[in-house]
Image: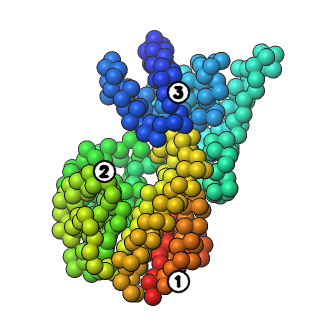
């Protein structure tokens, strides 16, 4: 790469970071702000935009390792960011230009920390008078979160949370080869698990939304962790279900396929405007057993409460939330989650299922909410899943941590009504 181009790219990256820094820990919609910053800079094309996106998200992911350097040694901060950025086409030439004399990036956080400690110490010897820097892996999560999920601070989960997530898709057509053949033609190095034949893991830069398979509704972008919520539950074909927090409908579409043509899903959400996206996705998938409702009526064989939560299970995709979410944020979500569960319990018919799920790693939003609900509703009893898929059933629900299957983290509890 031309040294002048590399220097200009580094300068622009540091300018973007300088504009974002005042909003860290304050703006839950930071990704939208990032897009707006890039859109205002008309001098960068789509390829460079992908580079800066990866660099900015690497900065957010490794904030405690990078941010302390910005005010005293911005060039080294930018170099560390380049070295830690995921190995993708947009970043490879940039990393080579700035870190060609550094070792290859190891897989684990512990090894990354050891190398950075040695490299930065050589750049900032004690005689320089500059303060020493810490590259402890545990600092990559807020310290207060350890009480919420101690295992998140341990390998392999800490490594997974602080790595770039792959793209997971769920096949929703009868001929899988229609999907696999196109992915092969795109030269995407995908992985299909024998245990989850409808789930495909693709590299982070796979632009699935631009594929013919996606446009024709043959696949939906859905993390395997999200898919496992329903795979952990005893969903039987032919039932009538309510998706009470449907959102854009990732789990709604999966549930409709599991229920089959004889089953039906009513979908609702307090955010009425987002249900338009669900309607579009259902039509694209040619699913006719989904009805969007404003006010659910009658009793259901099952009610899915995919509750709004802090999103700590998705921190690998949304690293800015690590620095935005606070203990009081989680406490507020827990109160809302219990209210939603309580409001939907009367909609479950006797013998039916109330399925509670979050993409949170915090026990305050997971086991504690379920325990509080069961204490007030003795007519519901928890059921263990038929298969655990490597997850941990705590007696009330099941938690899957990100390092188990390289997914987002989630929690799901199956509560059977007497």
Q: Residue 378 — which label?
A: 1
| Helix, strand or loop under label 1 | loop
Q: Nearer the viewer, mark 3 or mark 2?
A: 3
Residue 242, position in %: x, y? Answer: 32, 71
Rendered view: 98 above or below 196: above
Calculate the distance from the C-alpha at mark 3 to the C-alpha at mark 2: 43 Å
Q: Is residue 282 above or below residue 346?
A: above
Neighbor class of circle 3 (other Cα within 10 Å; few <14, some 14-19, many 20+) is few
Q: Nearer the viewer, mark 1 or mark 3?
A: 1
Residue at image location 56% in from the left, 23% down from the top: 78
- Which one is earlier in the sequence, the residue at label 3 or at label 2? 3
Few, some or many C-alpha atoms within 10 Å of disc 2 (few <14, some 14-19, many ≥20)?
few
Spatial CA distance of label 2 from label 1 is 52 Å
| Left or right: where 36 falls relative to 111 | left
Q: Quadrant of the C terminus?
A: bottom left
* Quarter assignment of residue 365: bottom right
Q: Residue at x 28, y 71 (%)?
A: 296
Residue at horizontal 43%, vertical 66%? 340
CA distance separating discs 1 and 3: 48 Å
Q: Give neighbour class at mark 1: few <14, some 14-19, many 20+ (Cα, 10 Å).
A: few
Q: Where residue 118 sits: x, y (%)?
A: 73, 30
Give the image's coloring scheme: rainbow
65 vs 169: above or below: above
Q: Which residue is mark 3?
A: 22
Q: Nearer the viewer, residue 263 or 120?
A: 263
| Residue 213 seen by the camera | no
Q: Is residue 415 left or right of residue 277?
A: right
The residue tagged 2 is 184
């Amino acid at each position: 790469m031309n040294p002048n181009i590399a220097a200009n790219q580094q300068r622009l990256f540091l300018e973007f970071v300088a504009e974002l820094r005042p909003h860290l820990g304050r703006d839950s919609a930071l990704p939208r702000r990032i897009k707006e910053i890039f859109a205002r800079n008309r001098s960068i094309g789509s390829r460079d935009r992908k580079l800066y996106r990866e660099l900015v998200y690497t900065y957010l992911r490794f904030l405690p390792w990078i941010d302390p350097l910005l005010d005293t040694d911005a060039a080294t901060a930018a170099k560390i960011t380049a070295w830690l950025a995921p190995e993708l086409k947009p970043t490879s030439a940039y990393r080579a230009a700035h870190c060609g004399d550094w070792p290859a990036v190891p897989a684990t956080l512990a090894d990354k920390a050891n190398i950075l400690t040695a490299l930065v110490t050589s750049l900032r010897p004690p005689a320089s008078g500059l303060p020493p820097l810490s590259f402890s892996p545990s600092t990559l999560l807020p310290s207060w979160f350890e009480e919420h999920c101690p295992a998140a601070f341990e390998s392999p989960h800490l490594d997974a949370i602080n790595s770039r997530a792959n793209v997971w898709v769920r096949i929703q057509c009868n001929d899988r080869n229609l999907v696999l053949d196109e992915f092969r033609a795109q030269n995407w190095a995908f992985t299909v698990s024998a245990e989850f034949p409808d789930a495909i893991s693709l590299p982070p830069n796979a632009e699935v939304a631009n594929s013919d398979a996606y446009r024709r509704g043959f696949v939906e972008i859905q993390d395997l962790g999200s898919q496992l919520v329903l795979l952990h539950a005893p969903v039987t074909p032919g039932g009538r279900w309510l998706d009470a927090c449907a959102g854009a409908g990732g789990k709604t579409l999966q549930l409709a396929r599991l229920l089959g043509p004889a089953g039906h899903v009513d979908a609702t959400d307090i955010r009425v405007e987002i249900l338009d996206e669900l309607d579009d996705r259902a039509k694209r998938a040619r699913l006719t057993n989904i009805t969007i409702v404003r006010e659910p009526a009658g009793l259901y064989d099952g009610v899915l409460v995919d509750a709004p939560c802090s999103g700590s299970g998705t921190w690998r995709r949304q690293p800015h939330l690590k620095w935005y979410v606070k203990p009081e944020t989680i406490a507020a979500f827990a109160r809302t989650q219990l209210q939603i569960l309580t409001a939907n319990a009367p909609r479950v018919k006797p013998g039916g299922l109330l399925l509670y799920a979050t993409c949170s790693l915090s026990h305050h939003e997971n086991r504690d909410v379920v325990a509080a609900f069961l204490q007030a509703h003795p007519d519901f009893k928890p059921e263990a899943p038929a298969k655990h898929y490597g997850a941990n059933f705590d007696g009330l629900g099941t938690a899957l941590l990100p390092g188990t299957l390289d997914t987002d983290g989630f929690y799901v509890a199956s509560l059977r009504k007497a």
